[in-house]
Amino acid sequence: MVVRDAPTYFGPLSYSIDSEVAEGSIRATIRVPSRRPITTLKLRLRHPDAAPPRGVTVEGDCGSRLDPSGELVELTNPRGTITVTRATDRREEAGRGRGQRNGNAVRRGDTMLGFKVDEALCDKCDLCVWDCPTRIIERPENGYPRIIEAEAGDCMGCQHCLTVCPPGAISILGRDPANSLPLAPEALPSLEAMELLVRGRRSCRQYAAEDVDPALLARLLTTLANAPTGVNRRELTFRVIEDRATMDAFREKAMAELRRAVDAGEVPEPLAGGAARFVQAFYEEGRDLVFRGAPHILFVTAPPDAPCPQQDVVLALAYFELLAHSAGLGTVWCGLASMLLAAVPQLKADLSIPEDHIHYQMLFGVPSIRYARTVQRDDGARVERIVL
């Protein structure tokens, strides 16, 4: 069965399903739409004889969870092409106790997480066992690490097992350790460099009339995907205006909608006074107090059922701010945009922000002003040391 470019809210969706029941598998290959990000995609692969599944393998860029029934696979934040393979009794019986040959190495894998150990590299140090946050990895005596299959659903997708393994013997969730960056201490920024970055960070409200290089912006957002989230759920969406023309159009529409709401008395207190002032400044004084003339804005959103959506959003923006400043860009946290969206909530539809999602935003661009030195406020916070 093949479906190509089916229209959906998220963009064209293509997928194929190959039923190889005689060989012991049913496989689905999905090309995930890219117009709008998908946070959760659910897939059910039914057996024609209603036989229960014996395992599911997921390959591609996504998190995954298996429903207790064993039939429904939940893919979180899927991107690109995802392959899901359901194993049947026949495949399970035929493969029990045997590894799969790959060159000169024997690899063993679980059925859900794609956990594989290259026995030619594994030195049985047990670091992956000790460092697994949910303790779902074990190593039998004289054997190699493996997933405790009954607990595979507890995997957080943190990839600690992949990153902690010194020789790079472990892969999981379709990730090859050879594609990770080495964490050599000398390659990391020094404490002095980080101190200077944090002390020298400034809120930028003056921007050059130019777009940020698209390649640089893509690099920043790709790196930002590594920001921490509660329970490693990774359900954030980054919504960004990438060019000045789009930003100018949004700015004009937003201020026009705000003026209409102010004139109609639709802005609730205590927002009404500030909204009226922003409209006056924009139309009578030529001053953009909300967006500060910035060429770009980044909205970070999280669904309300995430473990800690507000913290996830703020952490991502804090990481983005430091990344942007290290690349020579200016940023400013834009709380006034939250006020504007609260006063004119219909603007969320233009930004594809779901009504119930938690969000915050940051303006950014090439700064038109540079600061010569850090501020002096090391005493700006009170430190209380806890003694028990």
Image: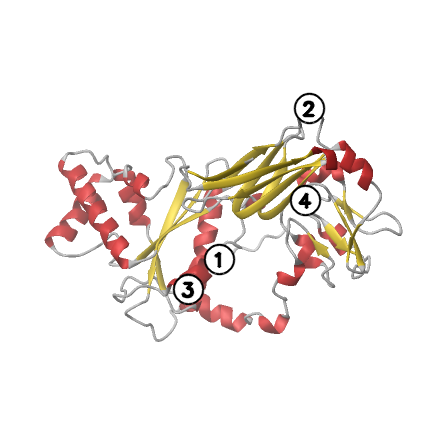
- Spot occupied by residue 212 in the image (x, y as percentages of width and height): 34, 64
Q: Earlier in the sequence, mark 1 or mark 3?
A: 3
The answer to whether residue 338 shows anywhere in this view is yes
User: How far is the residue under mark 2 from the one under mark 3?
Assistant: 49 Å
Mark 1 residue type: Thr
Nearest to the observer: residue 200 or residue 99: 99
**Badge 4: residue crowd in 10 Å (few <14, some 14–19, many ≥20):** many
Q: Residue furthest left?
A: 284
Residue ID for mark 2: 50
- Spot occupied by residue 41 in the image (x, y as percentages of width and height): 53, 37
> In the drawing, what numbered circle is on residue 215?
3
Determine which quarter of the picture holds residue 356.
top left
Q: Residue furthest right?
A: 142
Residue ID for mark 1: 222
**Badge 2: residue crowd in 10 Å (few <14, some 14–19, many ≥20):** few
The answer to whether residue 307 shows anywhere in this view is no
User: How far is the residue under mark 4 from the one under mark 2?
Assistant: 23 Å
Question: Relative to 328, does residue 336 appear above or below in the rendering?
Answer: above
Q: Earlier in the sequence, mark 2 or mark 1?
A: 2
- Spot occupied by residue 9 in the image (x, y as percentages of width and height): 40, 37
User: How far is the residue under mark 2 from the one under mark 1?
Assistant: 42 Å
Question: Relative to 116, does residue 41 appear above or below in the rendering?
Answer: above
User: How far is the residue under mark 4 from the one under mark 3?
Assistant: 32 Å
Residue drawn at x 38%, y 62% is: 214
Residue drawn at x 74%, y 58% is: 169
Secondary element at image label 3: helix
Q: Is residue 291 left or right of residue 70?
A: left
Residue drawn at x 28%, y 69% is: 368
> In the drawing, what numbered circle is on residue 113?
4
